[in-house]
Amino acid sequence: MCYIDIYGFAFGNHLLGMSRGSVKDIYRQEMFGVRVKLEAENIFHGMGFHIGETVLKDGMMTYMHTHDFFELFLIEEGEVRHYINGGQSVMRKGDIYFVRPEDEHCFQRGNCKKAQFVNMAFSDTIFQKAEEMANLCFDTKRNADRMEIHLPPRMELAVQSKMAFLARDKTSLTLLTRQDLVISILLDCLLILHSQENYEESVPEWLQKACQRMRQNQNYLNGLETFIEIAGKSQEHLTRCMKKYYHVTPTEYINRIRLEQTTILLETTDDSILDIMLECGFNNVSHFNQLFKKNYGLTPSRYRALNHSVINPA
C-alpha cells in the first residue's frame, strides 16, 4: 500500500484502516473505545496549516474522526466516498469539500482502482484572513451537504496546481509565502461556495450577458468604458450590481479575466512574461505582478514553472 499521509503522523499511524461495511458500521467505528479527534497543536507545528496527499487503494479507508480546525480536500484522481455527520456523498476528480471544526467524517475509496486526494488543514486565523479578503461573513453552521464545491473548469487546474505544489514542495518557499498561497486557495474556494449558496438569487439577465460579452478578447482589452457601454447602465449602477452578485468591482472583474488569460498563455506558450502581460491588457509591470501574486499566490514566473511541472511531470 502506497500513500502519503495528510497530517504527518495522523493518517499513517492512526486513521487509515482496511474496513469495509455498511454506512451504519462505518459510523460505529471507534478506535481504542473512543472516536479519533485531531488537534491543531499536534498537526500545524506553529505554521497555522498542514497540507499533504493521500492515496487509497484495496478497500482502504480512514477511521471516523473529528478535528478542531478547518479543512479542504480536493479529489485529484478516482472516486472517494465521503461520510460526514451521518450522511454520505460520492466525490470525483475536481470536487472540493469544505470541512468545519467538529464535523465527524471519514473517506473511503469509491468505484475505482485508486483514489487520490490532497488535503489542506488550516487554522481559524487563516480562515478569518480569507473571509476578510473576500469581504464575506461565512456561515459555518450551514448543513454539511452544502459544503461541496464544484470548481469551474477554468479554475480547476489553477487550484489543483497550487494545492499539489504545497503538498509536494516543503522547502523552496518561505513560511509567509506558503501561508499566502493557502489563503489564496481558500479565498477561491470561499467565493465559489458563496456563489453556489446564493445561486437562487438570480443574477439579472443584462448583467450575465454583459459579463459574458466582456470575456470576448477585444472587450476585456478595452476595459471599463466598454463594460459600461455593453451593460447599458451607469457606472454607479453597474458597480453596485457587480458587488452584489459577483463581489467585485467592474475593474476587478476585468482584471480577473485578463489574469485568467495570462495563466493560459503562461501554461501553453513560450512567450515572454512581458509580451503576455501586454497582450492581455496590462501595461504596468509592477501592477501586473502585484495583481497576479494577490490572485494566485505566486509570481508569474513561479506559476509558469509550477504548472509545467504539474502538467508535464519529469
Image (tube, rainbow, N blue to C red):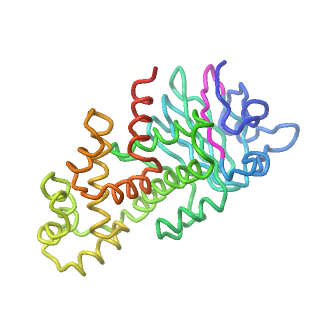
**Coordinates of residue 210 in the picture (x, y in percent):** 18, 64
When the figure is inspected, residue 198 is found, relative to residue 62, above or below; the finding is: below
Magenta stretch: includes residue 137: no
The chief SS type of the magenta part is: strand
Tell me what residue is drawn at x 52 percent, y 41 percent. Answer: 163
- x, y percentage for residue 77? 48, 29
Counting from the top left corner in percent of width and height, residue 108 is at: 61, 32
Quarter in which the N terminus is drawn: top right
Q: Quadrant of residue 120?
A: top right
- Residue at 85% x, 44% y: name it: 34
Magenta residues (range): 50-60
Q: Quadrant of residue 33?
A: top right
Location of residue 305 in the rendering, given as x and y in whole percent from the top left corner? 42, 34
In the image, is 243 to the left or to the right of 313?
left
Residue at image point 47% right, 65% down: 134
| Residue at position x 54%, y 28% in the image | 115
Name the one closer to the observer, 158 or 55.
Answer: 158
The verdict on residue 58 being magenta is yes
Q: Give 270 or 115, whichever is nearer the viewer.
A: 270
